Image (cartoon, rainbow, N blue to C red):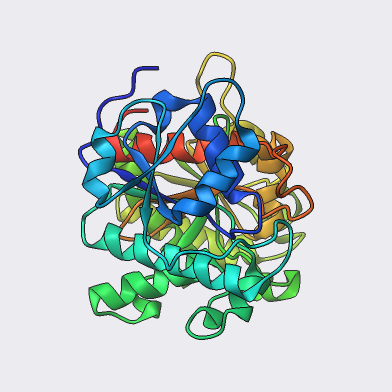
Amino acid sequence: MNWPELNLPIAITPGDPCGIGPEIIAQAWRTVPELTRGCFVAGDVGLMRRAMALVQLGPCFPVCEIESPAQALGVPPRCLPVLQVVPVAPNLPWGQIDARAGRLAGEAVLWATRAALRGEVSALVTAPLHKEALHAAGPPYDQYPGHTELLQAESARHAGVTVAQMPVRMMLANDELRVVLVSIHLSLREALDAITVDRVLETLRITHLALMPLLGRKPRIAIAGVNPHAGEGGLFGREEIEILQPCVSAARAEGIDAQGPLAPDTVFMRARQRADGQREFDVVIAMHHDQGLIPVKYLGVEQGVNVTLGLPLIRTSPDHGTAMDLAGQGKADASSLIQAIRMARQRATGVQ
């Protein structure tokens, strides 16, 4: 595909230097150079040269150092540009949890987030970091469970608001299905308590505003029920009657195309893109983590992309972790990262 030129470059952070992030980035540059044109790695030059050596096949694929994000737009084809945004990294061992790696990963994400908020890059793609290594890095990174919370806190600080005033949601997406979660990493009992009118309605608003620019129209949003058969009129639970139906009514009054609550055992099939390219719904609002992620991941983890909605910047990431057991072998699959770059580029250029 001939992608349109980027007005601003896309920053890609390498994730944990001991994990597979650096090598899947190198693999993406080697396999889809037309997609990565105009992108650059915000990280460490030496790390990316080590990673490129892991996947180097055939002709030399150089890693070059750039001095500013804008220079990435003029880098020659088949060359991986890196902006040194962290102290020069030591030669860290592949596949091990290391506080030094956690700090380098955190510093790269923090720099890239601030660059996006300053308007220096058009989007941010984050390779996986390791939560234990990030926590071991100490302040300020130990206060963030992962990428999302760090990006949310920094975006709120930039906007001069509290974190609570900048709510975010996770969308998992592939070519066939999009799902947005009402809650993420909560126990099932806690997740049920998180299904409130305010939280579900907030999820609907965030999803509506995030997908309108991508689709060029109002997204058709399906609301998955909580209970079997969406409660069967109250026979199997009253969350649909007391919480979800009022949310749908309120959302529709605001001009949001929301439908439901619908039976959770069939709504994902109705929202899945068919062979003719059509689908009944553009996105499903799932009530908790596993309800939404199981159908997306069943269609293929290697194609899944994590998109953070609600931020004043574009952020995507692959739908997998650091895979420490594979790191350093040059065998990691870059498919999910490639899809994350593709989705970031689509959103940055407005081209689907």
Identify the image quadrant of the C terminus: top left
Identify the image quadrant of the N terminus: top left
Closer to the camera, 12 or 161? 12
- Res 268 quadrant in image: top right
Q: Is residue 2 above or below residue 217?
A: above
Residue 108 coordinates in the image, percent (x, y):
43, 63
Q: Residue at x 53, y 21 (%)?
A: 59
Using residue 251 as the reference point, say whether residue 121 is left or right of it: left
Using residue 46 as the reference point, say whether residue 264 is left or right of it: right
Q: Residue at x 29, y 34 (%)?
A: 75
Could one spot residue 197 in this view of the protein? no
Residue 137 coordinates in the image, percent (x, y):
58, 79
Q: Is residue 96 above or below residue 217?
A: below
Closer to the camera, 49 or 125? 49
Check the image and name the residue furthest to the bottom: 139
Q: Residue at x 49, y 65 (%)?
A: 148
- Res 349 quadrant in image: top left
Q: Residue at x 52, y 58 (%)?
A: 245
Residue 235 coordinates in the image, percent (x, y):
76, 59
- Res 51 quadrant in image: top right
Residue 314 coordinates in the image, percent (x, y):
36, 51
Using residue 18 as the reference point, say whether residue 199 is left or right of it: left
Q: Is residue 49 above or below residue 243?
A: above
Closer to the camera, 221 or 105? 105
Q: Is residue 349 above or below residue 168?
A: above
Could one spot residue 170 in this view of the protein? yes
